[in-house]
Structure formats: C-alpha cells, structure tokens
Image (cartoon, rainbow, N blue to C red):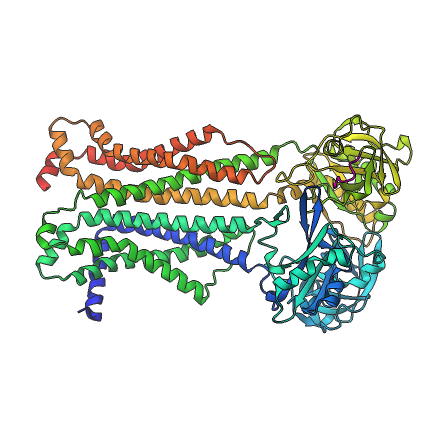
Amino acid sequence: MLTFALIRNQFKTASRHLLKERQFSLLNTIGLSSGLASALLIGLWVHDEFAFDKFHEKDSRLYEVMIHEKIGDGIATTNSTGEYIGETILNTMPEVETAVMTTPAAWFQRFSISYGSNTVSAIGNFASKDYFHAFSFPLVQGNKQEVLTNRKSIAISEKLATQLFHSPERAMGKVLEWKWQAYSEKCLISGVFKNFPKNSSQQYDFLLSMDAWNQIVPPGTTQSAGGPFDNFIVLKEGADIRLLNKKIAALANTNFNDPTSRFFLRKYSDAYLFGSYQNGVQAGGKITYVRLFTIVAIIILIIACINFMNQSTAKASMRIREVGVKKALGAGRSTLIVQFLSESLILSFLALIIALLITWALLPVFNNITGKDLPLQLELGGLVTILGIAFVMGLLAGSYPAFYLSRFNPAFSLKGGLTNSFSELILRKGLVIFQFTVSAVFIISVLVVYQQIHFLQHKNLGYDKDNVIYFEMEGRVAMQGEAFLSQLKNLPGVINASSIQQKIILPDMLPGNGSGVRWDGKNADDKIRFFRMPVNFNLIETMGIKITSGRSFSRKYGAESSNIILNEAAVKAMELSEPVGKTVMFGDVEKHIVGVAKDFHFNSLHNEIRPFILYLSPQETMLVMAKINAGKEQETITRIQDFYKTFNPGYSFNYRFLDHDFQVQYASEKLVNELARYFAVLAIIISCLGLYGLAAFTANRRKKEIGVRKVLGATVSNVVSMLTKDFLILALIAVCIAFPVAWWLMDQWLQTFAYHIYINYIVFIGAAILIILITLLTIGYQSFTAALMNPTQALRND
C-alpha cells in the first residue's frame, strides 16, 4: 500500500538518482524547459489574438453591417455601406437595439488639435451619438447619453486631456479647435474617455459628432446600399442572428433598389481574425497564422516530449538490472512505478519552473518581434493548463520504464533481456525520425518564406516607393496647393512633388462600381470595376510611373480636366486596341484617353493588378507626395517641416514614408518569417540534445562490442562509421519524408499570393545537407570518444 511517507521516500530516491545521472537530467531539463518556454510565449500571443476586440460588454450582441456586391462573375465583400443603412435596419428590424455609424478611419491620417497657442497632432473620427452605448470605451468625465449629441462637442482621450490640460478634470468644458484639410471648427469638450486598450482595432485620440461630418459633406439625397461608411448594430437580448441575417439580406433590393447586392451581419469581434473573404465566402485572415503558430507550439512540445521519452527509454533499457535487483530485494511493482514516475515528474516540473523564468526573460524581446505588450500574467485557467501539460509530459516520459519494465520478473531483469528489444527499434528510432522530419520541414519553410519576402520587397512595383514621403494637405496648404507645391519643389533635397487623393498603396480599398463607365464596344452585361484616383500634375513623374503609350498630364495642354490615363489592366479588361485618343463616358461626362500607364502594384502582391483610371483633378487631392534625395533624408525633411510651419502656421507637420505603407502590407508574413526562424533553430537544438543523449547511451551500451572490434583490428574510422551509420540513415529517412510535406505546405502558402516565387530544388538540397551536417556534428563527439576508448578497459570493466 502506498503511503505519504513511502511516496516522499521515493521522491528522495528519485532526486538522488537524477543528481547522479547529471548528463541525462541536464539534457532533459534543457529540452523540456525550452519547449515549454516556446509554448508559453506562443500561448500568450495566441491568447491575445483571440482576445482582440472581445472586451466590449455587448460583444455577443455587437455586429457590423457587411455587404456582398456582384462584380462580374465574382462577389466582393466589404464593410463599406451607405449612410442610411444603420437607420433603416434599426427602424425596420425589431431585433435591433442600437445602430451606430462612423466615417472610415482610413480617410484621416491625423488631425491638428489646437488649444490656445498649443497645437498637437491626434487621430480622430466622426461617430453617431450612440457610439459609447455600443462600444465599451468608458468615460471618465462626461455623460455617454450626451457626449456626441451636439455638432460642436468633442470627446477626447485621457492621454490627449493630460497632454493639453494635465488632467481629464481640467479638460472638461474647455474649447478646442480641430483642423483637417481646409476645414476647422471650435468644439466644447463634453467628455473624456479612457485610452482605448491596445487589443482594440479602433484607436482614437478624440471623437466628433457625425453631425459635424455632415457639415463638411452633407448627406446624399439618394439612398444607396453601398457606400464608404462603417455601420454597427447591437442586437436585443435573445435575438436570433441567423433569422435576422435572412431578413437583412433582402434590404439592398427592397429598400435601396440594388438587386446585385446583399447585406449580412458579421460579429464585430470576428473581424480581426476572420477578415478575409473570397468570392463572398469567409476565407481566413489572421486566424490562419494563429492556427499555424498554435500547431508550431504543439509540435515543439511534442519534440521536447520525444526527447524526454527517448532518453528515458534508452536509460530504462540500461536499468533493467536495477529493476531486477530491487525486485529480488522485495520491492513491489507499485514501488518501482512510483520511483520512475517521480523521476520524470521532478524533471518535468523543474523544467516548468525554468521555462517560466526563460519566458519572463525573453518576453520583452518577443514583444518587440510581435509588436505587442504581452504581460506574463497567468490566470487560473492558464496556470492549470501549463501545470497539466507539465504533469502529462512527466507521466508520458516515465510511463515506459514505470509500467513496462516493472512488470518483468527478477530473473529476466537480471539477465538484461531488454537490451535489443523490438520496442526500442519502434519507439526510439521512429521518434528520432519524427523529430528530424519536423526540423527539416521547419528549415525548408524558413528558406521558402525568406525567399518570398525577399521577392516581395525587391519586385519592381511599377513605381518608385523609395524616399517618397507624404502628408495631408491642411489649412493654407489645402487652399493654396499649387503655390505650396511650387515652393516645395524648390527646396534643396526635394526632387519632385505633387498631390493625390489617397495613398498610392491601397491594400484595403475596393474598386468603385463600374456601371457608370461606358465606352464604344462595351458589353452591356460587363460589370468591370475600376479603381479611380484624382491626381495633380507631376504625380506620375514624382512616382516614377512609366507611360507605355500616349503621354502624361501636362500643363502645356491646358487644364486637362477632361482627360484620363488608364493602366494596362484597364485596357485589357476593356478590350481596347490603340486606346489613346478614344473616348470613355464617366456617367454623362466625356473623358478622353491620353495615355496608358504600365501596370503598377497599388494593392499587395496577394492580389492581381486591377483596372485603374487616373484623372486630373487637383481640387480633389488630399495628400502631398514628395520625392527626396537619398542619403539626405533627415536634413531634407527638416527643411520641409520648417517650410510647412512657415507656410501653414497653427498646423502640425506629420509625414510618413511610402515605403513604410508598403512594408505594413506584409507585416503578417514578416512575423511568420521572424518567428519561424527562431522556432526552427529551437526545434533543431532540442532535437540535437536528444540525439546527443541517445548517441552517448548508444556508445555506452556498445562499449564492450567496440572493445572487441578494436582488439580484432578495427580502426577509429571503422568504429566512428559503425556508430554514426544508424543515425545518418534515420536522418536521411526523415529528410525523404519531410520533402513532400514541406513542398505541399509551402505551395499552399504561396498560392495565397498572386505573384510569388517557385520553390527551387536547391532549397531541398540545402536542407538535406544541413540536417546531415547537424546529425554528424551532434553525434561526432560521442562517436570519436567511444572510438578512442582503451579496449582493455572496456573489456575489463564489463
């Protein structure tokens, strides 16, 4: 019968044995703690990703209005809907409690906020009056019933209140002036809200009433299903979302006379992880990488467990005589089971403690890589989970010696009859193959991801993104744009400058409805949709976009307001031959094609280049684009800043590099590449630790055989070859299994890009060579040590 005293005694015995077998204990502890630390770091990141936007009190009832729009033979899905959608749903659907509308955050780079002579830059948006009812952004000052009801009211964040007034309390009732483009207005601070949490997809320093936006752009008289706005609704308790979606689907046709579109509701907090749609069907998003790294964490834990089990089984086969002696001296099977499990559990929980320390030490670096601010705060559920993982790992690793070896009778055990059992072949060698298969897949994946990212960053985009800055046209700059650009181009270090309505990089923008674009020969059923962009003179030259036929916009041809330039994709879609000189109708306005631009990538390389129309309309442009000299960026930007403040007093100068926007498009891919490299190295190191331990046990077990062979004339190279051959065969088998698996996985990933590399056979050759070299280096020391051993000592000590 097992008593507490007996169990305590067994743990003492187990501890002494682990201290005696230092190499075995050290290798297992390092492998387990590394695997657990990796799983902890990934677990913290995954937990944070799943928690994104889920902090809202009404999360289960908070939805976003989405729209499916027919485009040719396909369907485009977006959250951009008309300004009357939310109001219509609220008035016609009794299941709806609240409707909220905001302007798209992408419209506004930054605002200038002034209090007296103090002007700061801030991020803001316009929202309807029930915004703080739908979203849980608590007010520390003010009443959420009233904060956005007045056109001349403004709600600001604690951060902005502290920046301008030193405290939220002092901010209340003060008058601020906000400025954007050529618009400005003075508003009374009616509320102060807590800073938005970092795991919120909305990040604002202030909010203005939607009525203030309506003063800038009055509501349209025609109600349309599609539009630029974001509409959110809160359902009443108990509302059936499936039934409501069926009812809402028909609203586009019945209420907005749009039979080609269909509304549906998407849970607001799902947008962050499940934001991608293909042809009207939800198709992943960030959830793809969350699942990927969850699998990576599990695999690394499995590799660490395999190490533990491999070395435990190898050690156990050498402890069969110990089992026999203890049984002969009267030890029961339960006593042996407790002893072996105690050893494994002690190592497992020791590794867990070390893993927590490693996680704490590496968390700042990990946060820097992932761009997060993850704290090491384990809730009860998380703590129970990692304790459970450590417990299960300990049980698994100790299960073989505990339950298998302890069942043999003393006579069999004393003969050491398990030394070359079939279970050793299946367990140990099979697990080694699995470890190195995973390592090879990691290596190949890292190489392919690196090559694809290198391809993305160095592909000719059709324009020059380097050393181009952009900033918003505000105040006097917006009103006297031509004078500003003329003087800007004369500054030392500025090569060229122009203006455009939006950034040339449009990763989230959908093309406009093409029904208003007509030309001779157009198929009446054709639903081609075009990206249309107002630009200024010199924009094409500033961006380095190539004109393949015709010409660019030029002042020597007059106003050019009736002229357009198409990209090659538009010419192809419109099936135009010799397009220059032909006429295109924009609604009732006649436009003339004066040039064709070589295709350029205005979306990410995940997407094919779509039809694009550039038309000259300086009054519609909102961003200044300036090309500056390479190598003198900082001094040139300082000159531009000084000139801007002189030309446009009272406004803050906020610029960004165009290259930064390009890089942001591939932030997820870069994170995958960065983390995959670290975890590939870690998986290889853990596998090597296990292989090193196995090589040591193999050499020790075969020392008598080695002694006999050396007495009979075997050379050092013969012995080394004998000891390394089996492990090299295992590595080669692993490589052969890894090749098709890695190719399939990487091919699936590359298919998510419209433009991608093709996997080169050199990647596989390089991975195979690397795995073989790693294997040789890992087992080389043990092999040479065994080969140089004095044979007489081995034979005498046996």
Q: Is residue 603 above or below residue 98?
A: above
Residue 716 within the segment the image draws in magenta:
no
- Residue 112 visible to an observer of this rendering: yes
The residue closer to the viewer here, 130 or 527, is 527
Residue positioned 31% across, 47% down in the render: 307
- Residue at 69 percent of width and 32 percent of height: 462
- Which quarter of the rendering shows the N terminus? bottom left
- Residue 491 shows up from this direction: no
Is 133 or 510 nearer to us in this picture? 510
The stretch of residues the image draws in magenta is: 522-527
Q: Find residue 117 and report its image quarter.
A: bottom right
Which quarter of the picture shows residue 623? top right
Q: Is residue 637 above or below residue 252?
A: above
Residue 582 lies, in percent from the top left, at 84, 30
Q: Where is residue 616 drawn, in percent x and y? A: 84, 38
**Residue 581 image position (x, y, % from top left):** 85, 28
Q: Quadrant of the C terminus?
A: top left
Q: Nearer the viewer, residue 377 or 52?
A: 52
Q: Is 118 on the left-hand or right-hand side of 31?
A: right
Rendered view: 439 above or below 102: above
In-image side of 703 versus 528 (left or right): left
Q: Position of residue 776 (x, y in %)?
A: 31, 33
